[in-house]
Image (tube, rainbow, N blue to C red):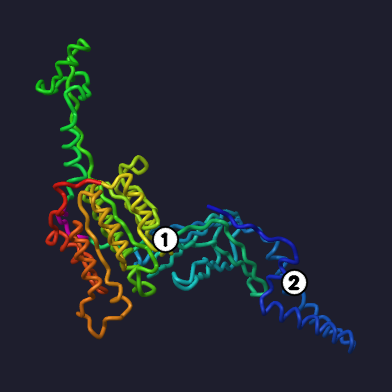
Amino acid sequence: MPQPDSPSGLRTGLRGLTTRGRSFLAAGFTAVLCAYVFGQDALLQIGVLLAALPLAAAVLLVRTRYRVAGGRRLSPYRVAAGQEARVHLRLDNVSRVPTGLLLLEDKVPYVLGPRPRFVLDRVEPRGFREVSYRVRSDLRGRYPLGPLQLRVADPFGMCELTRSFAASDVLTVVPQVQSLPAVRLAGEASGHGDSNTRTLALAGDDDVIPREYRHGDDLRRVHWKSTARYGELMVRREEQPLKARATVLLDTREIGHRGSGPASSFEWAVSCAASVGVHLMERGYRTRLLTDTGLAVPGPESGVIASVGEAAGLLLDTLAVVEQSDGGGLGRAEEVLRLGGEGVIVAVLGSLDDEQVARLGRLRRRAGGAVAILLDTATWAGLRHILPDAPDQDATDQILRLREAGWTVLPARAGDSVPALWRLAERTAGPAPYQSGAGS
């Protein structure tokens, strides 16, 4: 555990004088001056005593070498927006002398709540004290905690010195993740079944990679050509199906969203993308996150991340700090998907124009299945509270065009539940009209 730096020097002690200490010092100097002017020896003694008391407290406090160590533990270190996390603090007295009155203070951002302060009375030699406090934020992000500050005071309250620990921690507030129902998406098998079938169909008998026969192998898997070539019994390797792949496309364009703060359409979209991404990972998809800026976060089994838990944590950590972009289109995301767009695409989209709808139509041709969660951002801005059911002709035309291109479109409005919306993906899913002759 880290230890604080100990200040030294009378000047440091004088800077740590409290209001009480400064008042005693001023009163002592005044009494000494009056005693000199009026020739009162008794007043002189009183003035020296008043001035000496805070000075002695400062010197004593500066020369006191408290050896303390402090630590911090977060439980948990990653928390969803709107939920509480607990911060545990521990202070150890590693010296052979007891401490005096200690005031412990931890530095936290204002969005997490008030700055916690604790008063610790005498800590025995080799003893420790543990305290804790709670933090909560409705805004996602990464918030630094610390450094921990220790205020040492003398018994008379004349002087107070602050010693800081260098260590700090980070609390990550991630978007809220909602549990989604298991639905069968259109084209969801194209990430593994179709691709694997095409590979096996194109592979001839000479393309089989054999291995040595092992006890217990099925004799029907014996590869006779390789056996004759190598002079020992060889069998075909077991076929390893490709893992289903999925891409969650998040539209972060500032011009595509309305509202501000936690109730904005952008925050709803971020939470929706987090829920969908974690849900697909739990269902076995090798899921990556992609934004309109071209930012791509790999999923499990990508060569960098091994487990689903690590991949989900990386996705949530990325979404915790994602910000709105000043871009105007989806061109960069299209470039990334050109390098490998097979599998399922789930796009969480804000307001679109005709060019972006056309780009989405081209992206659909590179995917086995595609679901578009299209936000009616006007409902987040309160522009349709008078006629909430009034149709938006432009939005209706965009939905029709996307569906004609093969997208499963789920219109979303302010207040809609992500699990209820996701359940419609199976009911509204239909075969893409161009799949029989797809190509790009």
Name the quadrant containing residue 122: bottom right
Residue 50 lies, with reference to residue 70, above or below; the image says below
CA gap between label 2 and label 1 equals 50 Å
Residue name at image x 59 percent, y 54 percent: 95
Q: Secondary structure at mark 2?
A: helix
The answer to whether the residues at label 2 and label 1 have Cβ atoms under 8 Å apart is: no
Residue found at the very far bottom of the displayed protein: 38
Circle nearer the N terminus (2, 1):
2
Report the residue marked by disc 2. 55
The circle drawn on residue 402 is none
Front position in the image: 117 or 29: 117
Report the residue marked by disc 1. 321
Name the quadrant containing residue 396: bottom left
Residue 252 location in percent, x, y? 37, 63
Left or right: residue 281 compared with residue 114: left
Left or right: residue 293 compared with residue 277: right
Residue 427 location in percent, x, y? 12, 61
Residue 160 lies in the magenta-colored region: no
Q: Residues within 10 Å of mark 2 (few under 14, many from 20)?
A: many
Q: Residues within 10 Å of mark 1 (few under 14, many from 20)?
A: some
Give, as a three-letter code, the residue at label 2. Leu
Q: Secondary structure at mark 1?
A: helix
Residue 415 lies, with reference to residue 66, above or below; the image says below
Residue 428 location in percent, x, y? 13, 62
Give, as a three-letter code, the residue at label 1. Val
